[in-house]
Image (cartoon, grey):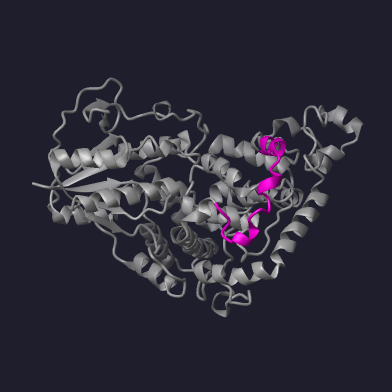
Amino acid sequence: MAVQLVWFKRDLRVHDHAPLAAAARAGPVLAVYLVEPSLWRQPDAAAQHWGFIRESLIELDAALRATGHPQAALRVLVGEAVPVLAALHRRLRLAAIHAHEETGNAHTYARDEAVRRWARAHGIPVVEARQFGVVRGLRDRDRWLAARERVMTEPQTDWPPPAIVFAPWPMAEAKVAGRRGPCAWALDADERWRTVTLPDARDLGLDPWEPPQRQRGGRTRATATLQSFLQQRAARYRGGISSPLTAPDACSRLSPYLAYGVLSLREVVQATRARLADLDPAASPEARRLRAGLQAFESRLYWHCHFIQKLESEPALEWRNLHRGYDGLRENDFDPARWDALRQGRTGWPLVDACVAMLNATGWLNFRMRAMLVSVAAYPLWLHWRPVGEWLARLFLDYEPGIHWPQMQMQAGTTGINATRVYNPIKQALDHDPNGHFVRHWLPVLQRVPDAWLFEPWRMPTTVQQHCGVRVGQDWPLPLVDLDEALRRAKARLHERRRDPAVRQAAADVVQRHGSRRGMPGARDARGRESATTRRRPPPPQQASLF
């Protein structure tokens, strides 16, 4: 009997998984995850991404096996998508390929196109379901919000589906020393399958380094994180997500679980709304704080889909300016010395370098500090957003291409439709780390620097440097540029380009394709005024980790 292949990608769950449910209704199911070597050679891939996925695959396999069906398992196959699917089709005869729509990077876009061409040539339907409130083939944003809401209010699919049957697997599972989790098979050049362990980072050609304190993958941790936020931590969401001191606990911390589909966005939206319905704001101050936090969080879930829709509608914004009038703005001025200092956390601005240290340790940073990092790279350091974006994609555990690349361009000022977002790292430190606890934690070398000079150590008198044991220029780097002068020069260059009549005229087309619409939280009208229907709702977030 021909099999219904379910291709897991960034949807590593069985709950609320429409392709899995559809395949179960159609016939015997083969659940597959492809480890594609070429995907892991892309410049946005990192060992921590694979580590998180690997942990999630182990729990996904266990969830499938828990049905008790003798053939229930996740089949992890190592090889490129088209050759692997072709080999499976010759061996098993595929009736259909079921998957979620994916808005990934340029490589996954090309891969999916190649799979569709191969499937059409062999008469195999590719049946895709929406993963988020993202509309494929969208021409403009006028009806987008209603389409997104329909997806969020649809019933979640149950697990396990009634009478699910799994297809027999023709390859024997050889015993592999040290194996934990699903068995994996690699497709050799002669199209023979061999049993292997789940690959590690080195097997995929990745630098094996990972942030030692990164979040761990898997459904168990995902649901626990969701529940702790809904029941308690959301009370600190409003007022707590901007400072890097309070954000690690006040933010939902759901972003990696949403990025890899361990949780579905619909289940998070519906769980948030259900919790809001249960809360009586008159019951206690804590209930009022919870309600306010959850309302703010739900508004940011709109922006999750809004940004991914940008990349879905215009995949090229991953590598070229959304507004082409900004081409040439920074490309010819890239300074390798500034670039190296930023990546090494040696810009001389303590808050910036502390954020880099935290990212290297945890793989996570709150949205305002991410925005500040990109702003510093784009304005005083005048670095093009693309290499900075690739570096941050590797550092962010929760890297979601559809959020990441539009946000990189927003912060760099190349969309042509967003306000200039310039963050002064000294002011941000004074606002969000006034006592210096964050900076001192992540930069131990500055622990003895007095508060008066902590955020501008280059201003310390020599006697103070000697007293606290920090010699500026030796123990601590001088700033790469004069901050005030560099910011003035950067703003002048950007605004000069923005005032160009041709640039201003082309911005209208960008608004039509990508601008937010009336009714969205924080949306603005054609004159840039906030919509009256949303004026009292929270403003849109500033950087890739929206939660």
Furthest toward the bottom, the residue is 532
| In magenta segment, residue 451 | no
Left or right relative to 365: residue 281: left
Q: Residue at x 27, y 35 (%)?
A: 77
**Compared to 50, does 528 lie above or below?**
below
Q: Nearer the viewer, residue 325 or 337?
A: 325
Q: Which stretch is magenta?
A: 320-342
| In magenta segment, residue 331 | yes
Q: Nearer the viewer, residue 210 or 240?
A: 210
- Give the x, y percent position of residue 28: 13, 48
Left or right relative to 114: residue 326: right
**Compared to 130, does 174 lie above or below?**
above
Q: Nearer the viewer, residue 240 or 474?
A: 474
Left or right relative to 119: residue 489: right
Q: Residue at x 35, y 70 (%)?
A: 150
Picture quadrant of residue 107: top left
Picture quadrant of residue 238: bottom right
Q: Residue at x 23, y 44 (%)?
A: 31
- Residue 69 appearing in the image: no
- Give the x, y percent position of residue 433: 70, 47
Furthest toward the top, the residue is 177
Q: Residue at x 33, y 60 (%)?
A: 130
Count the marks: 0
- Give the x, y percent position of residue 405: 53, 52
- Give the x, y percent position of residue 40: 42, 36
- Residue 372 appearing in the image: yes
Q: Nearer the viewer, residue 417 or 270?
A: 417
